[in-house]
Image (cartoon, rainbow, N blue to C red):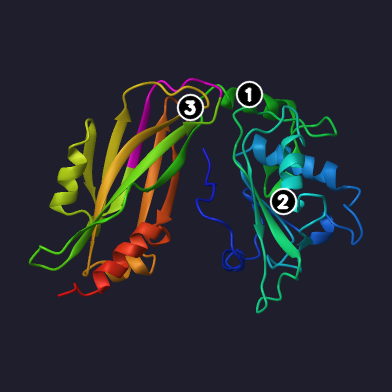
Amino acid sequence: MSNFTPSTSPWTLTRLGELGPDEHDFQEFKGSAWLWDGKAVAGWFHSALSKQVSAFANSAGGRLFIGIDDNGLPDGGVPVNIKPGGTRSWLEDVIRDAVAPSLGRYNVFEVHGGPDQPEIGPGRAVYVIELPPSGEAPHQALDHRYYLRIAGKSQPMGHVHVQDVLRRTRSPILAVARIGPYGPHELDRGDPRGPRAFICLRASLRNEGRTLAHHVGLELRLPRALVSKEARRRMLEQPGMQLSQLPGTLAAFRYHPTPIFPGQEVSVSAVWIGVHNSNRAAVSDGALRVGWRVWADDAAPVEGERPLATWGVVQRALRDLRDKPKP
């Protein structure tokens, strides 16, 4: 369905620095002057924003950056208090009603600089607007046109495009609503091969479309080095869990036994991993990731992944493995 995966952690200046200069179907850069003319909100902003929101929501989703130049670098940023209550809060209200029907799901991140980070000025920020594909598409912009992301640009939709979007919304749109550790890690110092930490990861799915999802399956792909016999045993205690060995990876698939209604979020699967001294370095440097693939009826599979080291529970497990037990 899409190569765009909504962020599971806040945007930071470090993440902005990793963007690179390229714009594409899932990414659009706009300089600060696109929103702020130096004294007030730019006169063209509302209509221009509406066009971008329509295009991303009608397509496969993506990110709109405000305060980033054509080279993918912060240009000083936008004032954080353009309106009472703050620029971020104002943007959240404006985006919702920038299209018809109103947009239901999106996110706005506010990225600040610092004393040693002159890329974003004091009292200013870069804004990252994440727009997932919409189950209510097609969305009409303020100029009464429908837009779509084509070859990295937001282009007006023709009649055939509108029909394609309408057909797309008849299929369920399932996405990973959340995935992460469930509870604290379990530290086992009794293994003669050395201490190990067991971590449970739980995944929930949300039906973001307007069509009932009758048949839903979730596959979680785990680094083989993290799946011990004990981790396998714990996973297989879950009814309906199927484990498949792939090169360097263990795939844990679970079919959800009941339909998922539009707007409903359900917990679908839980898996276990084991971190120990032999794989601790690979986890710590971000080399080991958890991936996922979601199936729902006749919709195209949705894929994503996340480094294990980004979760706080994993970081605490790594620290516990480094610390020597108290006598």
- Whether residue 273 is situated above or below residue 72 in the rendered picture: above
- Please determine whether, in this image, residue 102 is positioned above or below residue 319: above
* Magenta residues (range): 210-219
- Looking at the image, the residue that sits furthest to the front is 327
Q: Amino acid at mark 2?
A: Arg
Give how far across and how far down residue 104 sits, in percent. Answer: 64, 33
On the image, numbered disc 2 is attached to which residue? 88
Residue labelled with disc 1: 166
Q: Quadrant of residue 46 in the image?
A: top right
Residue at image coords 71%, 30%: 102
* Residue 288 seen by the camera: no
Helix, strand or loop for disc 2: helix
- Disc 3 designates what residue? 264
Q: Residue at x 78, y 40 (%)?
A: 50
Q: Is residue 323 left or right of residue 192?
A: right
Residues at circles 1 and 3 in contact by the CB criterion of under 8 Å: no
Mark 3 neighbour class, 10 Å CA radius: few under 14, some 14 to 19, many 20 or more: some
Q: Nearer the viewer, mark 1 or mark 3?
A: 3
Measured along the vertical axis of the image, is residue 175 above or below residue 32? above
The answer to whether residue 67 is seen in the rendering is yes
**What distance separates the C-alpha of mark 2 from that of mark 1?**
31 Å
Q: Residue at x 69, y 27 (%)?
A: 162
Which three-letter amino acid code belongs to the residue tagged 3? Gln
Which badge, 1 or 3, is on the more N-terminal residue? 1
Going from N to C along the chain, the mark reached first, 2 or 1, is: 2
The answer to which of 226 and 200 lies nearer the viewer is: 200
Q: Quadrant of residue 191?
A: bottom left
Mark 1 nearby-residue class (10 Å; few <14, some 14–19, many ≥20): some
Q: Is residue 268 left or right of residue 80?
A: left
